[in-house]
Amino acid sequence: MKLKIKILIGVLVVGLILIGGKLIWNLSTCRDICYGNKVQPQVPTAFGFDCASIDILACSKKCGAECETHKDCLEGFICNFENCRCISETKSEKQVTLTTDKTEYEEGEEMKIVINNKRDRPIYLLLEEDVYADSIKIEIERHENGSWVSALSPFTLFSKNQKCGSFGQGPRIGCEKIEPQEKLEIEKSLYYSKCVDEQPKQFSFPHGRYRLKIGIGEKCWAGTGKEAPNIIYSNEFTIK
């Protein structure tokens, strides 16, 4: 009997060593992946036996980006988040900008978002793939532990006076076109909502630093299964 117990204990010890070794190996080998000069972070899965990608693609100096934020550029220059290079503020007049009307908000406060196409050609934005099909797909990121992480994806915010099932058409997909030198203004309330029994239930975002994120393309890529050709970010703002 004692021999069987010793064998069993030995097997358990070996198993724990193998599992612990695998966990330590994954923690040390989950490496972020560079796509050009942008990075996609990799983290261990819930049980630590594999690596998973975080749905973030941001400029990264370790991938060869010249800048990660506007602060990385000299005075008179800003970071172009499409190619992660510093450009003159005068050249930025030819870019697409995503801005909010304020830099500080209360929970649930209404936010005005402006997408300004300063290019000489049209751009396309992805629409939500659900019953809110005429809502622009906007994502929100929160600053945590020195990096930006997805706070909610997609950013399911309701337009002013919008209600659950108000369209009633089921899943649809498409793009919103913004012509050259035109802008799109969107009003959202700073809460996210899920429909429960056809009624919206509201949830507030935690206090902290945030920014918005949208994908843009020179053609509509809806339904192709591909990622957005280009990503742009808004100014930072805080929720008190």
Image: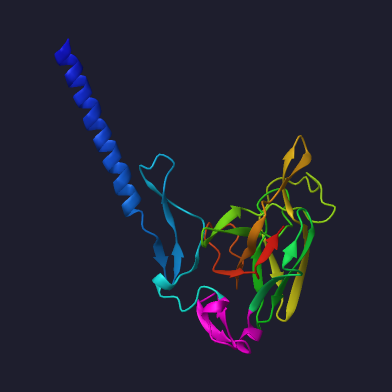
Which residue is farthest top?
1
Q: Quadrant of the C terminus?
A: bottom right
Q: Left or right? Give the position of 145 relative to 182.
A: left
In the picture, measured across the screen, residue 80 lies left or right of residue 197, that is left
Residue that extends furthest to the left in the rendered view of this protein:
3
Q: Residue at x 66, y 75 (%)?
A: 97
Q: Residue at x 45, y 70 (%)?
A: 60
Q: Residue farthest to the right?
A: 161
User: What is the x, y in percent for residue 17?
Assistant: 24, 36
Against 230, is 90 above or below? Answer: below
- Residue 236: image x %, image y %? 65, 68
Q: Position of residue 79 (x, y in %)?
A: 55, 79
56 lies above or below 232: above
Q: Give the tally of numbered discs.
A: 0
Q: Within the image, what quadrant is residue 95 found in?
A: bottom right
Q: Is residue 19 magenta?
A: no
Magenta stretch encompasses residue 71: yes
Q: Position of residue 196 (x, y in %)?
A: 74, 36
Q: How is the image coloured?
A: rainbow
Q: Quadrant of residue 198?
A: top right
- The span picked out in magenta is 70-95
Residue drawn at the location 44% of the way across and 41% of the way down: 46
Q: Residue at x 55, y 85 (%)?
A: 87
Instruction: Say above or below: 179 vs 113.
Output: below
45 and 121: which one is in front? 45
